Each structure stands twice: as C-alpha cells, then as structure tokens.
Image (tube, grey):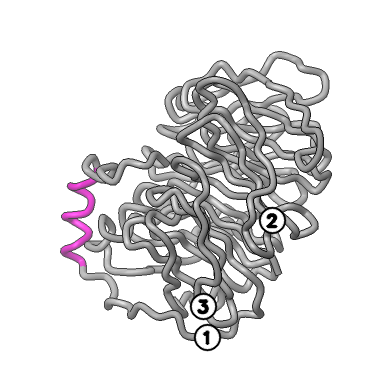
Amino acid sequence: MTGNRTLLQRTSVVLALAALSGACASLPESSTRSDAEGGSLFVANKFGNTLSKLDLDTGGEAIRVDSCTNPHELAASPDGEHVALACYGGQSVAIFRAVDLKRVGEVDLGENARPHGIVWHANGDLYATAEGRKSIFWIRNPLGEAETFEFATGQEGTHMLAVSPDARHAWTTDLGSKTVTAVDLLTRRAPRSVEVGIEPEGIALSPDGKTLWVSARGSNKAFALDPQTLAIRREVATGAFPLRIAVRPQGDVAVTSNLADTSLSVINTESGAVLRTIALDEPGNAETRQQVTILWSPDGSRIYVAETGSDTVAEVDYESGRVLRRLTVGDGGDGMAIID
C-alpha cells in the first residue's frame, strides 16, 4: 500500500453503505496485558520514518528510533537477532539490531529502487521487491559483505513477494499490471506473469509450498494459485478491499485484511470456504483505521493487524475473534515482525 492517506476516496460509496449497517460496537483502545506469550513486536512507522519495538507482555513501546524515508515492510532474521526495513521512499534496505534497534547495516539497491516487500529467508538471505525498477533483489549475506542479484519482472507496481522454502523461486504481486509474476532465482529463466483480478497486492505461500494465495483489493477476492503453473485453482469472495493475505502457521486457514470494512475474512485453505468474518471495528470507521498489514503470532493463536490511520495495532484472538487490545505505535504503523 502506498503512503497516501487519501487512498480510501475511491471506496467512499462502499464505506457509506457499510456505515449504515452499524455492524459492531466500538472497541476500546487498550495496551493492557493479554494472554499473549511474550516476545517483541517490531513495527515500521511509514509516516513518521521510525521503527518501534513493543513488549508484548506489557503492550508498551520499549524503543522507537529514526529509520529511513517512508519505511513499509519489515522482516526479522531467522535467528531473531536483527530486523530489516524496506525503505520505500529511497533505494535501500536498512538493518537494525533487534535488542536495541541500533542501525548496523544498509544495502543499496540502486537508483529509483523503492523497495517495498521484503522476506528474510530461513537460509539467511534477504529478498526484496524494487517497485521503481520493476524487479526483485536477492541479497546474499546481508550482515556481511552483501552481494545483490537483480531479477526483472517487467511489471508495473511489483509490490509484495513470497519466496519458496528452498529459495529457488519467488512470486510477486504487481499492482499496476494486475499480475502475479513467478521468478526463477537459480536458472534466470524469463519470468512468467499472469493476470489475477484487479490490483492484486497481498501474497502468501502455504507452509508446504503447494499453494500460492493472492488477494486482489480491486476485486474483493482472494485467489488460490498453483505456484508452478500460476493456474488459478479457486476464487473466494472476501470483505471490501483485501490488500493483504496471510496463511496461519498451521496452514489450515488464510486470512485477508479488508481495509474498506475493518474486517478479516477467514478462509479454509482446503475447501476455499469463508469460515467466518472477524469485525475489528464498525465499518464506518474504516477510513479512520486504515487497516493494512496482518501478521500471525508464531503459534497461530493471535493475529496482529496494523491500523495505519489510527497509529495502532489490533491484537486479535484467533479462536474467539475478539480484539484483545490495541497497541499504540508510531505515525503510520504498517510493516510488522515478531521475535519471541
């Protein structure tokens, strides 16, 4: 998602209708302790150009530091020692030490890179989209003498990405081209792109690597794709403006973040059925909340939802669908990562 606070103008009609329904009662702002099992939540505050570290035991912000211009997505290293920020307003990936948020590195991706989506793979390497260059980057050895390898997608708005468990393939959502692109990271074969709905943005690979899930915000749909052929196996109607999708660590459900009605659509990954809709607020408050990124806790018991407009993160109990608390973050909290 771009950093423009006026993104929702195009959905004003949807919001007006949804507001009439008065679907759910207002939920209190709170940072009191929930039953979460601790750890730290890291949040990229894209309007404030800062990075926050929150203590999940207390719900309080432990540290906030200056980061880079318009940071969007965020990824944690496999060993939990570092976090990496995609600096969407510039051309680099910035790396911070998790314990104290000291900036310890930066990888330059070249002129007009505008990195957005980012993955810190289990193999220790970083992968990031470069929207301004219509490409993705493989960053080998990001904490040492980093090497960068660029792979063109040739598509407009290469925004988010997923990487296979064996790091042989990556997939991107390309907002401007309305496509999903498959990139071979080893053979450098020509990338393959297929149209998937209108404005595909969210993307997530199932834990077993066998299904690629995509949410198309302009279609109000989620799509299940074959990762190898990019054939669409299933289309699922979701809530309004589903700009993110995340698969539960257990692999049983995929959840979309629906910006225009403040809801989450919970999809059974086997059948494609929408099991339920979780309301985080009244639909009429969608423009105030500007709900964006979603993140599962490692054990799959919680969903963290960044509410960029209200500078909060909603902590949702998956089993009950209840908002346990809202955590206060910096200006425009967006990308998130958890380290236990």
Gap in Å between the C-alphas at discs 3 and 2?
A: 20 Å
Specify whether residue 308 is painted magenta: no
- Which residue is at 73% across, 23% downward? 149
- Which residue is at 29% across, 46% downward? 5
User: What residue is pinned by disc 3?
Assistant: 59
- Would residue 16 appear left or right of 93 to someone viewing this image? left
Query: Which kind of residue does numbered mark 1 sit on?
Result: Arg
The earlier-in-sequence mark between 3 and 1 is 1
Q: Secondary structure at mark 3?
A: loop
Q: Give x and y (percent) for residue 187.
A: 82, 19
Q: Nearer the viewer, mark 3 or mark 2?
A: 2
Q: Give x and y (percent) for residue 153.
A: 60, 20
- Would residue 306 appear left or right of 226 to someone viewing this image? left
Q: Which mark is residue 97?
A: 2
The earlier-in-sequence mark between 3 and 2 is 3
- Residue range (magenta): 11-21
Q: Which mark is residue 33?
A: 1
Q: Give x and y (percent) for residue 174.
A: 50, 29
Query: Which kind of residue does numbered mark 3 sit on?
Result: Gly
Gap in Å between the C-alphas at discs 3 and 1?
A: 6 Å
Query: Which kind of residue does numbered mark 2 sit on?
Result: Arg
Few, some or many residues within 10 Å of mark 3 (<14, 14–19, 20+): many
Few, some or many residues within 10 Å of mark 1 (<14, 14–19, 20+): some
Which residue is at the front of the view, 323 or 221?
323
